[in-house]
Image: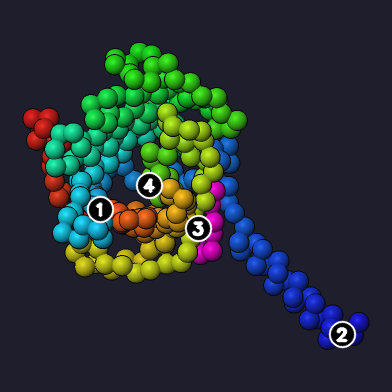
Amino acid sequence: MNTSQFKFLTVAFLLLTASAGFAQTDTIRLKDKRLNTSTLKPGMRQYLVYFQMPQSPKTLRYWLWLRNTQVQKRNGENVFVTTQNWFGSDTLSYRSGYSVNRVSDFSPIYHSETVAGKNKAFNWAADKVTGADTVANNTKKGFAIIFAEPCYNWNLDIETFEMLPLAAGKTFAINFYDAGFGKPEFTIYKVSGSEVIATYDNHKVDCWKLVNESDFKGQHATQTFWITKKGHEFIKEEDVFPGGYRYKVKLPATAFNILQRISGK
C-alpha cells in the first residue's frame, strides 16, 4: 500500500467514524440525569390547540390549553408541580391534570387526570406505578404495573423536551409511559434541523425542530416540535396524521385568565 492509498483509507475511516458518532442516539434515562432541569422555567403557559381536517375544510376543532409549573416542597424536597387545564366548546370536552416530579432529575412521584368527569390517580415510583387508593372516586384504584427500569411521565412530554440537550444531528430515545395505558417504551425524537419562525407578535425566534415519526392505525404519522435555542421554550407543534392535522401554538401568558374566573379569584 502506497502513501496515497494509506491517507485515503485513513480519511475514509475518520469520516465513517464521525458519521456514526453524529447519528448516535442519546438514551434519556433517569439514572443518567441528562435532563437539564434548570431550563424548565416555572410559570403559566397557554396554547391554542386546533385540528384541521381536509374532509371538513369549514370546521375547526379547538381548545385552550393551560399548563402551569411551580416549584414546591414535598416531604422536604423540591418538586415541580404541573397542572393542566383544557377548555373546549362544552363542559364534556374539559379535562385537567396534576403531576408531581422531583426537581433533581424530573422523576415522577404522582400523576392524576380527569377526563369526561372521570378521575384516575397514580402513585409513581422508580420500579412501578400503582393506583392511589387514598384518592376519592379513583377509577384506577386497583391498577398496578411493574417496570424494568424507571421512566418519565408522557403527559409531561413538552416539559421534558424543554430540558433536552438539543443540538444539530442529535437523536434521543426517551423512556415514556402514559399512566394506565400499555407499558413504558422508548420513543425516538430526532433534531431534524433548525428554523427561524415568527411568534404571535411577529417576533423572530431561532428554534430547533424535534421530530417523532410513528405508525398511526397502520399509516405514517409525524410530530414536529419547535423549541427555542435561546430559552429552551416550546412554542409550536405540528402533527400530521392520516386524515388531518393538529397544531399547538403558544400564546402570551396573559391572553386569558379563565382559571381566576372559574375559581372566583
Q: Position of residue 39 (x, y in %)?
A: 40, 48
Disc 1/disc 4 C-alpha distance (Å): 19 Å
The answer to which of marks 2 and 1 sits earlier in the sequence is 2
Q: Is residue 246 above or below residue 106?
A: below
Q: Which mark is residue 158?
A: 4
Q: Which mark is residue 51?
A: 1
Q: Which mark is residue 3?
A: 2
- Is residue 179 visible in the rendered structure shown here? yes
Which element is circle 1 on?
Answer: strand
Specify the amino acid type for callout 1: Phe
Label 3, on which residue? 190
Disc 2/disc 1 C-alpha distance (Å): 62 Å
Q: Quadrant of residue 181?
A: top left
Circle 4 residues within 10 Å: few <14, some 14–19, many ≥20: some
Disc 3/disc 2 C-alpha distance (Å): 40 Å
Instruction: Point out the image quarter for the N terminus.
Output: bottom right
The answer to which of marks 4 and 3 sits earlier in the sequence is 4
Q: Are marks 1 and 4 in contact (CB under 8 Å)?
A: no
Which element is circle 2 on?
Answer: helix
The answer to which of marks 3 and 1 sits earlier in the sequence is 1
Closer to us: mark 3 or mark 1? Answer: 1
| Nearest the eye: 160 or 143 | 143
